[in-house]
């Protein structure tokens, strides 16, 4: 073995211990009955379990809503931050990014306390509020990154060719910032599908998300069904990320 | 005003922060003219173009297009189109959609768009490139698409911002010829920005030479080459020997330590002047007594049609000379300059005059730095003063941190036995410097001035 490849050994061990092994375990558990034999029953159980399917639909719905709200709020914010005429200080950018530095659980707990104090009943509204609050920075940052690096001569060229500021925005700025939007969507949509803490704290488990039922199953020692649900979620996340064409651009947006 | 004036720029000034980028620019451009704005980087040529295009608003003055004031009209409503320096082709659109971009915004019918795009592609010799991705094109091809895109909108004036600077030499020469032909065929006005004097001479009907935010000379390429108004224009256009001289009296000038007859009058007596002699205007003789002065050939290079020689005069000045005959290095030669070939020019400045403010009895603040000096009695801290520093008393340091203030070399003139530099300080002030050391355009330098070389005078209001 050459000297250089020996450097990778710690990382390989890490990957095996914390990525490959757990994944293999999830797959094994998912296809195991209570008696330890191979079975598809855990998977088929999900597709006949009305509660689980309903929760799944709610999760996807909430994730889509959250992602859309994050785009609608995050894009203008990123655009304003990236615009040197409107924002000259790096401090405002840090203020927007700062929530990312604080543990999401703490923020969620604090938000729940705030709602209690204000006497607002917990429900779908508070759930979405908490999610947008938690995930908005993950939408703003990649879009901001793309916008700030965009060559200023593109919008100028569009204006020069007769585009009004509105047309410049829709025909040039938005298409050119698609990589940022894509990676923002990936960073918001996928974690929202699997989250359970936010729904627990901000709806008192009135609204259950897909992550919640996985957690409940595992907490009540239903390891096999829990693992099957986790596997299904993993496949869905994998499939959505395949839909994001131009993944390479999206990755670049994060750098 | 004559009717064929299409663009009329009146008293346009622009500052970015403390830097005056344009100072009271006045310029008329005729319909169908090919005008080049020529100057070194930082001379304001691009800012002037951007003001015409509408991307920058002037602080003062106005720009008229066909008699209509353009100030306040946004770029998308101006009947002008720009070819950008780095093309700025939209990477998310193919060649067809790039060229059709402006036409689609105007809701031109589809069949007409098709026709125009095809016509434009033919004009720039890129027929059948419609479906190509712009990123898959070479630099030269991208440049052609950028020109096609700008012309598709049928602008009255085409603005070109150093469009060829990113191309290699061969491609640049080809594109120059094509641009010239395009201009002739289309008959619209071209305003072209470049720092390349050869490009300007090849392409233009009129050249506007700019320096430090001011127009130095406006004229045809021939005028500017043969009758440069000052030493800067002479150095920027073509090769030339630029020398310090003294006008002794009318028709008599002294330089390189010899007196010469010339044809210039009205410069006063014993006044410092710049003398410009083109390399082809110095005659060489092997018989030294046939010349007015003598020297030794230092180098001789064949340039295709003529030989280019550098000759050191006996007094130690280096002259560049072009001749159809070769003179071997080491040859002792006589040299002669005819009176009509001596260009005498007033010096724009003979000493640096800098605005300053007294800090205390031994310091003065100027150009955003505090310099040690001897403040004469009668000045109190806070007094505004005029500071004079001779060109050869400014010391340049190779590292910006070594100087009291930092600057960038903007232009370099060789004056036979020393270099004359224009150095722009970070505060935006243009300092003239005489030095023996070799610097290049764009060099970053530190600036020091010895205390004894700083002269403080009351500010004359």
Image: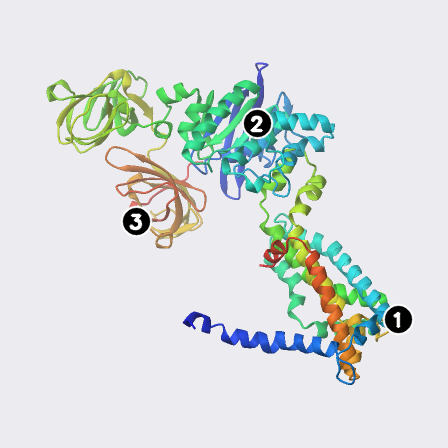
Q: Which residue is mark 2?
A: B158
Residue B296 in the image: state x and y as whole percent: 15, 30
Res A247 seen here: yes
Foreground mark, 2 or 1?
Answer: 1
Q: Nearer the viewer, residue B406 or B389?
A: B406
How dense is the environment of label 1, judged by Cα within 10 Å: few (below 14), some, or many (20 and up)? few
Image position of B306 with respect to B351: above or below: above
Q: Nearer the viewer, residue A131 or B254?
A: A131
Image position of B380 with respect to B128: above or below: below
Disc 3, SS: loop
Q: Is residue B220 left or right of residue A143?
A: left
Tell me the CA gap for discs 1 and 3: 89 Å
Q: Residue at x 58, y 76 (%)?
A: A16
Instruction: Give the letter of the chain under mark 1.
Output: A
Q: Is residue A123 left or right of residue A235?
A: right
Q: Residue at x 37, y 52 (%)?
A: B400
Q: Which residue is mark 1?
A: A50
Foreground mark, 1 or 3?
Answer: 1
Instruction: Give the letter of the chain under mark 2.
Output: B
How dense is the environment of label 2, judged by Cα within 10 Å: few (below 14), some, or many (20 and up)? many
Q: Which residue is mark 3?
A: B450
Tell me the CA gap for discs 3 and 2: 50 Å
How dense is the environment of label 3, judged by Cα within 10 Å: few (below 14), some, or many (20 and up)? few
Q: Residue at x 66, y 45 (%)?
A: A173
Q: Quadrant of the C terminus of chain A?
A: bottom right
Q: Is residue B41 left or right of residue A226?
A: left
């Amino acid at each position: 073995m050459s000297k250089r490849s020996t450097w990778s050994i710690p990382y390989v061990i890490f990957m095996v211990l914390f990525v490959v092994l757990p994944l293999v375990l999830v797959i094994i558990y998912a296809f195991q009955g209570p008696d330890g034999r191979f079975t598809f029953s855990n998977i088929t159980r999900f597709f006949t379990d009305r509660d689980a399917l309903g929760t799944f639909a709610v999760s996807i719905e909430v994730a889509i809503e959250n992602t859309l709200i994050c785009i609608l709020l995050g894009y203008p914010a990123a655009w304003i931050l990236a615009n040197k005429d409107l924002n000259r200080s790096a401090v405002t950018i840090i203020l927007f990014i700062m929530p990312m530095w604080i543990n999401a659980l703490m923020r969620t707990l604090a938000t729940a306390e705030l709602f209690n104090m204000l006497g607002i009943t917990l429900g779908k509204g508070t759930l979405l509020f908490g999610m947008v609050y938690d995930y908005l920075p993950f939408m703003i940052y990649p879009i901001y990154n793309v916008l700030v690096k965009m060559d200023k001569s593109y919008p100028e060229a569009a204006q020069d060719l007769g585009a009004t500021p509105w047309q410049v925005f829709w025909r040039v700025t938005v298409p050119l910032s698609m990589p940022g939007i894509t990676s923002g969507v990936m960073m918001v949509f996928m974690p929202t599908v699997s989250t359970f803490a936010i729904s627990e704290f901000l709806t008192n488990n009135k609204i259950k998300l897909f992550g919640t039922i996985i957690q409940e199953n595992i907490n009540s020692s239903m390891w096999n069904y829990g693992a099957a649900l986790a596997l299904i979620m993993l496949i869905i996340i994998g499939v959505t990320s395949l839909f994001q064409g131009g993944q390479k651009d999206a990755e670049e947006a994060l750098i | 005003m004559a009717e064929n004036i299409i663009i009329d720029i009146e008293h346009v000034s622009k500052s970015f922060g403390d830097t005056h980028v344009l100072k009271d620019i006045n310029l008329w451009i005729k319909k169908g003219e090919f005008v080049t704005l020529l100057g070194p980087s930082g001379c304001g040529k691009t800012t002037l173009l951007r003001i015409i295009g509408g991307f920058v608003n002037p602080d003062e003055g106005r720009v008229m297009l066909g008699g209509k004031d353009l100030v306040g009209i946004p770029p998308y409503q101006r009947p002008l189109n720009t070819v950008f320096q780095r093309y700025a082709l939209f990477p998310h659109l193919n060649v067809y959609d790039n060229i059709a971009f402006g036409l689609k915004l105007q809701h031109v019918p589809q069949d007409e768009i098709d026709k125009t795009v095809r016509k434009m592609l033919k004009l720039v010799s890129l027929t059948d490139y419609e479906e190509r991705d712009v990123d898959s094109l070479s630099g030269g091809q991208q440049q052609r698409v950028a020109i096609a895109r700008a012309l598709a909108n049928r602008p009255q004036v085409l603005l070109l911002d150093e469009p060829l600077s990113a191309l290699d030499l061969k491609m640049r020469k080809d594109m120059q010829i094509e641009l010239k032909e395009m201009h002739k065929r289309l008959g619209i006005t071209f305003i072209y920005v470049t720092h390349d004097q050869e490009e300007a001479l090849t392409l233009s009907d009129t050249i506007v030479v700019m320096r430090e935010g001011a127009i130095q000379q406006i004229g045809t390429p021939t005028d500017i080459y043969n009758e440069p108004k000052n030493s800067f224009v002479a150095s920027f256009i073509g090769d030339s020997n630029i020398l310090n001289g003294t006008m002794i009296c009318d028709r008599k000038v002294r330089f390189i330590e010899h007196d010469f007859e010339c044809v210039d009058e009205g410069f006063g007596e014993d006044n410092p002047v710049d003398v410009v002699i083109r390399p082809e205007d110095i005659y060489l003789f092997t018989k030294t007594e046939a010349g007015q002065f003598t020297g030794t050939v230092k180098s001789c290079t064949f340039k295709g049609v003529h030989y280019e020689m550098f000759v050191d005069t006996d007094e130690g000045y280096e002259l560049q000379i072009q001749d159809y005959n070769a003179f071997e290095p080491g040859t002792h030669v006589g040299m002669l300059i005819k009176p009509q070939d001596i260009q005498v020019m007033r010096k724009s400045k003979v000493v640096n005059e800098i605005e300053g403010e007294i800090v205390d009895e031994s310091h003065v603040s100027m150009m955003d730095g505090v310099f040690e000096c001897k403040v004469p009695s009668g000045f109190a801290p806070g007094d505004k003063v005029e500071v004079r520093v001779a060109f050869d008393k400014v010391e340049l340091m190779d590292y910006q941190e070594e100087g009291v203030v930092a600057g960038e070399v903007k232009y370099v003139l060789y004056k036979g036995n020393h270099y004359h530099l224009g150095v722009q300080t970070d505060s935006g002030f243009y300092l003239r410097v005489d030095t023996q050391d070799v610097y290049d355009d764009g060099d970053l330098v530190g600036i020091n001035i010895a205390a004894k070389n700083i002269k403080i005078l009351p500010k004359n209001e």
